[in-house]
Amino acid sequence: EKAEIGLIGLAVMGSNLALNIAEKGNKIAVFNRTPEKTDEFYESAGDLKKQIIPCKTIEEFVDAIRPPRPIIIMIKAGDAVDQQMEALRPHLSKGDIMIDAGNANFRDTVARFDRLKDTDLTFIGMGVSGGEEGARHGPSIMVGGTEDSWKRVEKVLTSIAARYNDEPCVAWLGNDGAGHFVKTIHNGIEYADMQMIAEIYGILRDGLGMSASDISGIFGEWNKGRLNSYLIEISEKVLAATDPVSGGPMVDMILDKAGQKGTGKWSAIEAQNMGIPATAIEAAVAARSLSSMKSQREAAEKIFGTQAVSFPIAYGPELNKDLELALFAAKIGAYAQGFAVMAEASREFNWSLPMPTIARIWRAGCIIRSQFLDEITSAFTKAPDAANLIVTPAFSDMVKESIPALRRVVAAAISAGLPVPALTSALTYFDAYRQGRGTANLIQAQRDFFGAHGFDRLDGKDFHHGPWGSGAASF
Ligand code: NBP
């Protein structure tokens, strides 16, 4: 019996995904560049061995799969994927589908898709979220490619995806790079979500002098309410963990330099490319970069002194509620920005990205999974063409309720000298977005003064330059 699907790359993600596929009753052929890894993987597969065909050569591997062959490539992102695709190509036949399931830049995905356009092979760019655990027991899967190729893999992918109320967290989102683009924005939102949680942690730790275990308790309590989410849940657990070396809280021993692999940065870059503000995501990316400048920060602290923090509001039930609501308001801002970026990309790249479906497949399996995404699903289902999440009826009510708390928390944090860039960005995004008359009239006047760029008038009259007098550019 031939395999239903093939998978190349048996490192952490690939081997877990392969076990998931096998466990759901699908026969799978596997291959890894270094053949010893294939042996190791097969030997550790236990009862699932009967569903797995381990292959040592590409020829053997391709031959083991039922045509047209879907082949998942789950290897290091970048050039390795192109090399693997080239090695695979001569062995493939009509209708075979190469599926890149790594964290590709969607622009590479579009290029790979285009390269195969006039051949009888095809390509799927598949975003997979949920880390190792998700890959093994149910990830959120974002698929981009042709509808025909999706139909060939729909059954297998549906069988392995995470489920929310029994609905599978997998969907075909559009042509070529749609899946990897949506995965990128997922990660951008994830950066913002994590940074905003860390900023609230900073207020509790540095502004209010709380211990890791106190903060863990607060997150645990919030996880039962509107902030219920995987990231709050793991923050509670992380803050409760004890360091086996020092015996103190684990987090207190961890170096405060955040890593990044690029997806957050790509979100910010693509948002800027399209002229869509994603300020909370940008702030989160910049905050990681600033975190990595540990020695500069330490040197600056010597010059400017340790901030004598005194948070202006005393801790009690009221501040607890305000911090929870503030985080919620800021979260709405970050998600609104992420969805607005996807809406514009959908127009620019002709993808017809289905917003309610994207929120639906993020409800389980992925890192940003939460109850909140169920509310986004329903808001976009009711108002699929809304210009922005925050103006949908359901969310505008939530924003009205929660923004005052975000304003109080940000104002207090700033007056205490605590850095809260992502929370602040979400707040000022809201304040600028809901301002019918902004201040860009002055920018336009300045531009006209120095560059004769012209402006439009409020009364629509046909006078487009100001009476600036001497020193102004001539037009
Ligand atoms: P790695 O990113 O560590 O890559 C290791 C795998 O790539 C091995 O199987 C290795 O084969 C193979 N490989 C390399 Br390196 N160069 C190759 C080449 N030129 N040709 C063929 N194979 C090559 O694996 P990972 O951590 O499992 O991640 C896989 C993908 O999933 C990446 O794109 C990553 O960004 C993404 N990822 C996603 C998540 C998530 O939550 N969705 C989490 C972690 C990673 P070898 O054994 O012969 O060296």
Image (cartoon, rainbow, N blue to C red):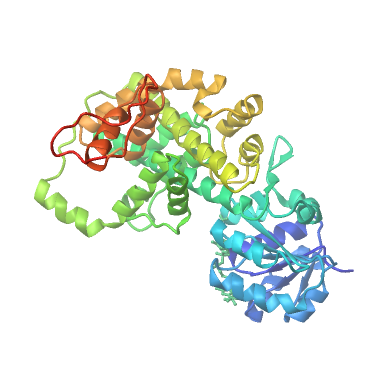
How far across and how far down the image is residue 151, in percent? 80, 52
How far across and how far down the image is residue 440, in percent? 31, 30
How far across and how far down the image is residue 435, in percent? 37, 22
User: Which residue does the image show at 63% across and 29% down from the upper left?
Assistant: 384
How far across and how far down the image is residue 404, in percent? 36, 20
Instruction: Give the quarter of the figure containing the C terminus.
Output: top left
User: Which residue does the image show at 66% across and 62% down from the upper left?
Assistant: 113
Instruction: Give the quarter of the figure containing the N terminus.
Output: bottom right
User: Which residue does the image show at 73% across and 52% down from the upper left?
Assistant: 160
Compared to residue 464, the image places residue 280 above or below, namely below
Compared to residue 303, the image places residue 74 above or below, namely below
Q: Is residue 319 in sight in this rendering?
A: yes
Q: Nearer the viewer, residue 431 or 42?
A: 431
* Total marks in image: 0
Left-right relation of 95 to 280: right
Compared to residue 363, the image places residue 257 above or below, namely below
User: Which residue does the image show at 59% across and 43% down from the upper left?
Assistant: 346
**Quarter of image, res 235:** top left
- Quarter for ligand 1? bottom right
Left-right relation of 164 to 445: right
Which residue is most to the right?
1
Compared to residue 336, the image places residue 368 above or below, namely below
Q: Is residue 208 in sight in this rendering?
A: no
Q: Nearer the viewer, residue 256 or 240?
A: 256
**Quarter of image, res 132:** bottom right
Q: Nearer the viewer, residue 322 or 263?
A: 263
